[in-house]
Amino acid sequence: MTMSPQVPDNDRPPPARIIPDRWTWKEIGHLLANLPMVVVGFVYTVLMTAVGVGLAVTVIGLPLLALGLHGARLVGKAERGRARAMLGIRVDEPSPMDLSRREKGFFPWLWTSLKDPVGWRAALYSFIRLPWGVLSFVVTLVSLIVLWPVLPHIARLLSNVDRSMVRGLLSPSDELERRIAELESDRGVVVDTAAADLRRIERDLHDGAQARLVALAMGLGLAKEKLTDDPEAAARMVDEAHGEVKVALQELRDLARGIHPAVLTDRGLDAALSAIASRCTVPVTVSVDLPGRPAEAIEGIAYFTVSELLQNVSKHSAARSASVEVWRAGDRLLLQVTDDGQGGARMDGGTGMAGLAERLGAVDGLFVLDSPVGGPTTVTAELPWRDREQRTGKDPKGTGAAVRR
């Protein structure tokens, strides 16, 4: 929203003057428009409540009330717009009533609509405004005729009451609604990510180790049949089966490492990040400076974030070197991955950056990408720090520490 430069940063218009200025005239216009607006809002609210509650014993009462609350939201939106335009106050729009992540169907919609705090506060605003709207209209009209010398001060006093009502009933309540919407979205991200990981694990098992084990069972069955008739052929089949067992075991180890690597569980981030850095196609310097081990969930997210970033370095950066730094700052775990490659990485560039940002956002983390064309590329991520001993009671030993450059 763009405000006029005449409105100071403290969200209040300039002081009232004896000679009305344009802000005084806007306030007067707002106060005179109060009467028709409050009459319409009051009648709508009373009818909505009376019809919805009165017919609540029937099948149409609660749906009508739910629709009425949606309409009350629209009334509140119109009043916020009028206050912004005429009173010059900065008031955010409350979070939309988003059902996209919820269970589909009529009853979830009905329940969510009936407990919508934004709709109920807008209805309350319209209901209690009737006497004030009539009073402010009459006082403003009389002042235009009789109390002209003090009209700007009266208009300012009355409009300040309107400003307080709008802020108190029509603005987001202490960011709670916005935070609820963010958590709803984050929960959806976590669910989608978990479902995708489960599909990947199922696919890897089906196409990899499971297929090899099936082939192994068939090979051993044939070897068993040939054991007496052709011992040499049976021996060759057993030898081939032995090789298949080794390959299957390696695939299972790789799959387990992709779920949660043993080195991370046993030795912490320093050793785990050094292990994945050693598999990168460019030399990587790792520096981990942590006073202890964070909670397992945070540690795992940090590990897989660095792992995916180093995969991007190997595949896309054309870099000659890279570095990984991890440290704690207050109640945040910070990690930074830098490479001297060609740069030009984007959040929508197909390198998984957007997915990483969503995963970090789901746990109140931050993800910042700085990759100008020509390089270097620097990715900085923040995660909330939670001590491991507070969650699991484990001794957070075994975490290596390096001096952060």
Image (tube, rainbow, N blue to C red):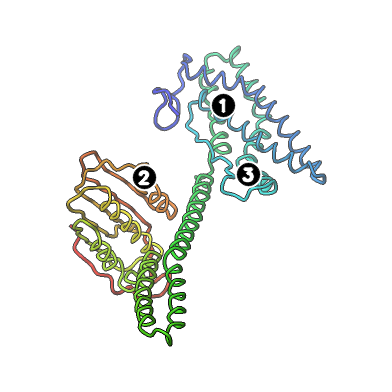
List x then y, in percent, for residue 382: 34, 54
In this orientation, which residue lies closer to the viewer: 1 or 223?
223
Amino acid type at circle 3 is Asp
Residue denoted by label 1? 158
- 46 lies left or right of 1: right
Looking at the image, tell me whether mark 2 or mark 3 is earlier in sequence order. Answer: 3
Up-down: is 11 above or below 24?
Answer: below
Q: Give neighbour class at mark 2: few <14, some 14-19, many 20+ (Cα, 10 Å).
A: few
> For the residues carrying marks 3 and 1, which lies nearer the camera in this image?
3
**Residue 350 — which label?**
2
Measure the C-alpha gap from mark 3 to mark 1. 30 Å
Question: Looking at the image, which residue is at 57% across and 43% down?
Answer: 98
- 267 lies left or right of 285: right
In this orientation, which residue lies closer to the viewer: 124 or 321?
321
Marks 2 and 3 in Cβ contact (< 8 Å): no
Specify the quadrant of the image occupied by residue 262: bottom left
Residue denoted by label 3? 116
In this orientation, which residue lies closer to the viewer: 124 or 398?
398
Specify the quadrant of the image occupied by residue 275: bottom left
Which quadrant holds the N terminus? Answer: top left
Measure the C-alpha gap from mark 1 to mark 2. 56 Å
Amino acid type at circle 1 is Leu
